[in-house]
Image: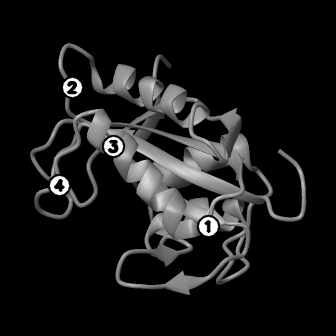
Amino acid sequence: MQGNNTRSVLIAIGANLPHLRQSAHQTCAQAVQALRTLPGLEVERVSRWYESAPVPPSGQPPYVNGVVLCRTTLEPTALLDALQKVETQLGRVRSVPNAARTLDLDIISMDDVQMHTPRLVLPHPRATQRAFVLCPLRDVAPDWKDPLTGKGLKTLLEGVAGQEIQPVGE
């Protein structure tokens, strides 16, 4: 998928509740497979999986998080619609903000697109404040810079140094 109408997109994946008989980790892996089948989206790289404490802190179980680097021909809201459909297929029920969930797919950034609508804000407004986004993002796009501030990952990661996160299986 090359051409002038393709954009690079970073999608964060997270879950902290089981779905059917699958663990949160298995659901995240299944989400990557679902992304591979979306028309107009090509998965280029998948980060390691990380386990992190909920942000803001709560009594919820830890999250499994990762980031995928993709190329897409989809417009931002069409991509959002496709991601929400995958979330629903994998058991996501929307309730209150920051509730525990079977799956969360967030568009972190789409090249240098900046938009602010009731449905979608790009780049993601809280991504740079969350280790569970920045650590896996570093795995797939180590040279990424925040489109709003121009800050690189080294600087951004220093700002989240106190947050609990570790690679799964390490």
- Residue 62: x and y, percent? 26, 37
Which three-letter amino acid code belongs to the residue tagged 2? Answer: His
Which is more N-terminal, label 4 or label 3? 3
Q: Which residue is mark 3?
A: 87
Tell me the residue at 62%/49% (across/down): 137
Q: State which quarter of the image contains the N terminus.
A: top right
Label 4 amino acid?
Answer: Arg
Instruction: Of the two numbered discs 4 and 2 on the same chain, state the one appearing first in sequence.
Output: 2
Mark 3 touches mark 4? (CB < 8 Å): no
Mark 3: amino acid: Glu
Query: Which one is nearer the viewer's eye here, 61 or 69?
Result: 69
* Residue position marked by numbered label 4 in the rendering: 94
Q: Which residue is mark 1?
A: 75
**Marks 1,3: beta carbons within 8 A:** no
Q: Secondary structure at mark 4?
A: loop
Q: Vertically, is 1 above or below 145?
A: above
Q: Which residue is mark 2?
A: 19
